[in-house]
């Protein structure tokens, strides 16, 4: 599935005569990637799921949701297909975390506190580039918070919990 996404976005890039900056992409995701690797090495599956299945998927979904209205017809079609897959990936993590919520809650809160500020840093880092594409930073933040808040609610957190957890990223905004 991810290979199909890669090929689709490579086609979008060729269509727009854009060369991907893979070094920037590696650097852009490096802190989340490093946190994931440390958690995996420590056997913290819950932290890995929060990073990959919640944060990364919600980040992708929000970026795609904001991009689709400004995309050209070719990119829009590809992106709409990809975003459907991303919702499926998000659901995988949600379902596991929901089934294991009580045992996972404390680690989820700790992982959220460590990783959510990285999302704000990332959004700030690409705000100017996103704006060039017609994607407002505030819309990206809003859509991310909606997606992420819904995911946290779906796995068992209360609205109060979601608000408290969401505030952990505000210091970086």
Image (cartoon, rainbow, N blue to C red):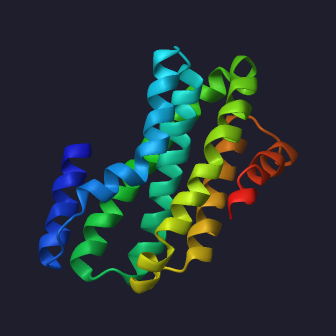
For residue 1, say whether it is visible: no
Q: Nearer the viewer, residue 150 or 19?
A: 19
Q: Nearer the viewer, residue 167 or 90?
A: 167
Residue 104 lies in what quarter of the image? top right
Image coordinates of residue 36 in percent, x first then y, are 48, 31
Q: Could you tell me which residue is drawn at 53 percent across and 38 percent down?
A: 51
Q: Is residue 108 left or right of residue 36?
A: right
Query: Does 66 appear above or below 153?
Result: below
Query: Does 98 appear above or below 87?
Result: above
Q: Could you tell me which residue is drawn at 44 percent across and 27 percent down?
A: 37
Q: Nearer the viewer, residue 11 or 42?
A: 42
Q: Which image quarter is the N terminus in? A: top left
Query: Does 9 appear above or below 153?
Result: below
Q: Could you tell me which residue is drawn at 22 percent across and 62 percent down?
A: 9
For residue 111, say whether it is visible: yes
Q: Which image quarter is the C terminus in? A: bottom right
Image coordinates of residue 73 in percent, x first then y, are 25, 81
Q: Is residue 156 left or right of residue 38?
A: right
Q: Is residue 15 left or right of residue 153?
A: left
Image coordinates of residue 91 in percent, x first then y, are 51, 40
Q: How many marks?
A: 0
Q: Could you tell me which residue is drawn at 74 percent across and 26 percent down?
A: 105
Image coordinates of residue 49 in percent, x first then y, are 53, 31
């Amino acid at each position: 599935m991810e290979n199909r996404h890669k090929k689709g976005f490579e086609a979008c890039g060729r269509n727009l005569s854009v060369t991907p900056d893979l070094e920037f992409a590696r650097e852009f995701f490096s802190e989340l990637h490093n946190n994931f690797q440390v958690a995996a090495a420590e056997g913290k599956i819950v932290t890995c799921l929060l990073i990959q299945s919640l944060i990364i998927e919600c980040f992708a979904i929000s970026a795609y949701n904001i991009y689709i209205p400004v995309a050209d017809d070719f990119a829009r079609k590809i992106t709409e297909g990809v975003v459907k897959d991303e919702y499926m990936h998000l659901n995988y993590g949600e379902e596991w975390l929901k089934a294991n919520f009580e045992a996972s809650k404390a680690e989820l809160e700790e992982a959220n506190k460590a990783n959510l500020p990285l999302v704000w840093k990332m959004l700030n880092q690409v705000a100017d580039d996103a704006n060039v594409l017609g994607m407002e930073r505030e819309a990206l933040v809003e859509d991310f918070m909606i997606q992420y808040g819904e995911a946290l609610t779906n796995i068992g957190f209360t609205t109060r919990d979601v608000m408290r957890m969401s505030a952990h990223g505000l210091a970086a905004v």
